[in-house]
Amino acid sequence: MLSEYATQNITFHCHHTYLDLSKFDIKLHTKNGMIYRMYSYTDDSLRYDLIQDQCRIKSHGQTILAIRTNKSVRLPIINLELVNRFHRNDYFTIEIGPICFA
């Protein structure tokens, strides 16, 4: 593929829940079976930008992460794992967007 990089957005829609993603250990699962840790200091194969962060400061809204990589084989993200405890009444939905090549 002739693309320099690829991006994919992940959107968290929070409903009556505060969600601070910096407090979670997030694992990103790719279609090719790889697992990347979101906040790993030793793995720089995927970069992310926080485009919007409403769920951290209010209980309704959305938080949008843009995942970026210079190797398109690392995408698409097809699943993710939040490895932390939640409260019983926490409710949010996750939308994994399409890949954009540039």
Image (spheres, grey):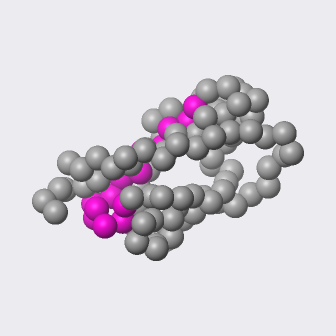
Instruction: Judge whether residue 39 can be spotted in this image.
Output: no
The quadrant the N terminus occupies is bottom left
Q: Residue at x 71, y 31 (%)?
A: 15
Provide residue 22's location: percent of width, then percent of height. Answer: 63, 48
Residue 93 magenta: no
Q: Is residue 19 left or right of residue 71?
A: right
Q: Residue at x 61, y 35 (%)?
A: 13
Q: Image height check: is 3 above or below 36?
A: above
Q: Which residues are magenta?
A: 62-75
Q: Image height check: is 14 above or below 24?
A: above
Q: Is residue 4 left or right of residue 40?
A: left
Provide residue 49's location: percent of width, then percent of height. Answer: 43, 44
Instruction: Please count the marks in the image.
Output: 0
Residue 73 magenta: yes
Q: Residue at x 36, y 53 (%)?
A: 68
Instruction: Judge whether residue 9 can be spotted in this image.
Output: yes
Provide residue 97's location: percent of width, then percent of height. Answer: 42, 44
Provide residue 81's location: percent of width, then percent of height. Answer: 62, 60
Q: Residue at x 46, y 73 (%)?
A: 34
As rendered, which of 38 and 16 lies closer to the eye? 16
State the residue lying farthest toward the bottom.
33
State the residue lying farthest toward the left.
2
Q: Is residue 95 left or right of residue 20?
A: left
As rendered, which of 13 and 50 lies closer to the eye? 13
